[in-house]
Amino acid sequence: MNGLWTTPVGKRAPEPRTDRPDITASQISDFSYCARSWWLRRVEGIVAETAETAAGTRAHGLVGDLVAESVVLERVVRLCAGLLVLIAGVIGTLWFVR
């Protein structure tokens, strides 16, 4: 490093650790998506498509479909709730004006 990395008070910063492998942002993303899959690839070195990984891919796909459906249902519920509030406001306004 030749002294390029220094702290604000002029002391040398510690050298970066080289005894551990780097973990990339994509690996963090993989881990957050499926820790088991990350472990199999990163630690066990299993990258081939097996019956188990194919089943895991299908299971994740089903979960993804359910999440997508729940997002749509949430939007429908919010729309219905908004319409009910609007209708209640109109009815309340008409009742008070009368």
Image: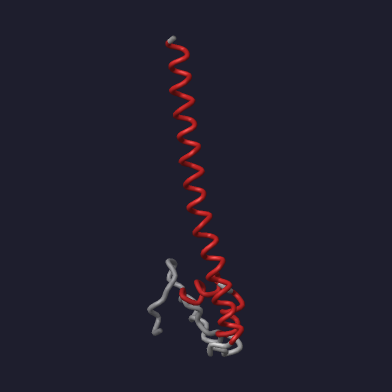
Residue placed most toward the observer, 94 or 22? 94
Residue 71 in the image, given as x and y percentages of width and height: 49, 54
Q: Residue at x 50, y 37 (%)?
A: 81
| Viewer-closest of 23 and 50 | 50
Viewport quadrant of the C terminus: top left
Residue shown at 57% from the left, 88% from the top: 50
Give 34 or 60, whichever is nearer the viewer: 60
9 up-or-down from 1: above or below: above
Residue ranking furthest to the top:
98
Q: Quadrant of residue 41?
A: bottom right
Q: How is the image coloured?
A: secondary structure
- Point out residue 34 in the picture as x, y percentages from the top left corner: 57, 73
- Which residue is rendered at x = 51% and y = 73% of the image? 28
Residue 62 percent coordinates (x, y): 55, 68
Q: In the image, what residue occupies the spot 61% across and 77% down?
A: 36
Q: Position of residue 66 (x, y in %)?
A: 55, 61
**Quadrant of the snapshot with the N terminus:** bottom left
What is the count of numbered marks?
A: 0
71 and 33: which one is in front? Answer: 71
In the rendered view, would you say 33 is above or below 15? above
- Asked if residue 85 is positioned above or below residue 31 in the image, the reply reads above
